Image (cartoon, rainbow, N blue to C red):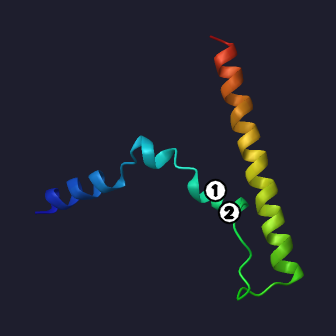
Amino acid sequence: MSEEIKNEEQRDSKLTAKEAFDFGPVLGYFFRKKDPSRPTNFNIKAMHTINKISIIMFLIAVIVIVSRAIGRM
């Protein structure tokens, strides 16, 4: 019985290629419309700006690492 549950958990935990490379939520974070019901203050704006900067820096770092790996081949 526990072996069946373990197999189910392993099957559920595996990501498919489509799920792994789905950038829809990331793009939605950058290009979403302003929600008038959402509260706005300086702290929230600063937090979102820092998050966007960190996402951009991460993507640039991934591009650099991939390009270096391709260049060594």
Three-letter amino acid code at disc 1? Val
At horizontal 71% and vertical 21% (from top left) the residue drawn is 68
**Across the whole image, how many numbered discs are drawn on residues?**
2
At horizontal 70% and vertical 24% (from top left) the residue drawn is 67
Q: Which mark is residue 29?
A: 2
Residue at mark 1 to residue at mark 2: CA–CA distance = 5 Å
Q: Is residue 73 left or right of residue 46?
A: left
Dot 1 crowding, Cα within 10 Å, few <14, some 14–19, many 20+:
few
Q: Which mark is residue 26?
A: 1
At horizontal 81% and vertical 71% (from top left) the residue drawn is 47
The quadrant the C terminus occupies is: top right
Q: Is 66 located above or below residue 2 in the figure?
A: above
At horizontal 71% and vertical 43% (from top left) the residue drawn is 59
Position in image of residue 4 (x %, y %):
14, 58
Q: Is residue 54 left or right of residue 71?
A: right
Label 1 with label 2: CB-CB less than 8 Å: yes
Three-letter amino acid code at disc 2? Tyr
Position in image of residue 35 (x %, y %):
71, 80
Name the residue at the left extreme. 1
Q: Is residue 35 left or right of residue 12?
A: right
Helix, strand, or loop for circle 2?
helix
Helix, strand, or loop for circle 1?
helix
Dot 2 crowding, Cα within 10 Å, few <14, some 14–19, many 20+:
few
Q: Is 73 located above or below residue 9 in the figure?
A: above
